[in-house]
Image (spheres, grey):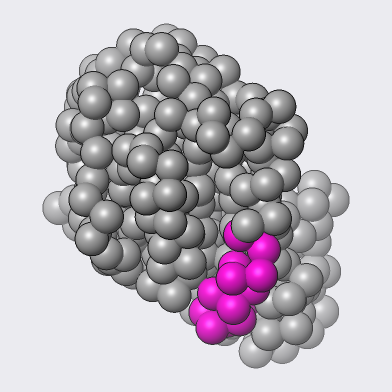
Amino acid sequence: MLILGIESSCDDAAAAVIETAHPGRARVLSSTVANQDDIHRAYGGIVPELASRNHVITILPVIERALETAGHALSDIDGIAVTRGPGLVGSLLVGLMCAKGIAHSLGRPMVGVNHIEGHLLAPMLEHELAMPYLALVVSGGHTALFVVEDFGRYCRLGSTRDDAAGEAFDKVAKLMGLGYPGGKVIDELSRTGNRKGVRIPRARIKGAPMDFSFSGVKTAVAAWLASEMGATTESADLAASFQEAVVDMLIRPTMEAARATGAETVALTGGVAANSRLRTRLAEALESEGRRLVAPSLKYCTDNAAMIAIAGSYRLLRGEADSLDIDAQANLAL
């Protein structure tokens, strides 16, 4: 099958074309993204209405570019996979309505995909993964641990109690006056900083060792910046200390989950999976216990439509389709 994937859950409008004959195996023919960082940078974060308005402008050109790069016409497409949630409802509606229009006009099947499921299966775009496997999804909107038991069968072991890790990066970057998006700039700045320069507390959830909490590190950074010592602290040292604390708080529950489930393979996915320190330290921690880390290329860590296409492919290959009256759901459960 040739599957067109469409993703518009937040501020990136994306389209991709994949070719697949078996669930979990695909050849990515194209993957295009229209990024809005320049639009939202002035506000220090994503403005939902601006995101959805710009999706209206960019969604069709992004799809056309994906088809052109793949060397196919729209009429060649056998099925459509589109994100229906979770996410910003205005943004979701743009991609979903576009997918419905294409499906109706071509008479092709369409399936709505959970955005988190896309992240869980994203490593399959480049790696062969035997199920079950453990997955850490860590992004601006989500931080959670899942066992991927089979296609469509996922067991959540733990999740964040407050902020997502990516959200904490963005908020701390804003507190430090580093700009947006925060994850990338903190990662780069941290490379020249002292990771022990500032004492940042690590949160642990009593009675829930596989859960996460990141609101405390944000508060700690704010308190440090407001102190006398904060005025003389190098930005690189504070960034490195903050990043190390977040990485510690991501690795500890992941290792707990790996030991509890006996997982030999752990997938790291989501936008924060692009963080160089997290990738290095988690790989080392897993290797020390005879386990392996699998992580997508950076282009498949952040929001993209190829992951949506492969997440919808197993249903399309089975001949399934959703009704064209399905709606976007901002808090869609997995």
Looking at the picture, tell me which residue is in the foreground, 100 or 89.
100
Q: In the rendered view, tell whether residue 328 sits above or below residue 305.
A: below
Q: Please provide percent x and percent y for residue 231.
A: 78, 84
13 displayed left or right of 176:
left
Looking at the picture, tell me which residue is in the foreground, 316 or 49.
316
Q: Please provide percent x and percent y for residue 195.
A: 69, 51
- The residue positioned 54% from the left and 83% from the top of the image is 49
Q: Quadrant of residue 28?
A: top right
Q: Please provide percent x and percent y for residue 37.
A: 72, 67
Looking at the picture, tell me which residue is in the foreground, 100 or 253.
100
Q: Is residue 111 magenta?
A: no
Q: Quadrant of residue 326?
A: bottom left
- The residue positioned 84% from the left and 51% from the top of the image is 192
- The residue positioned 72% from the left and 44% from the top of the image is 65
Q: In the rendered view, tell whether residue 58 sits above or below residue 308.
A: below
- The residue positioned 63% from the left and 34% from the top of the image is 73
Q: Is residue 47 magenta?
A: yes
Give the magenta range: 45-59
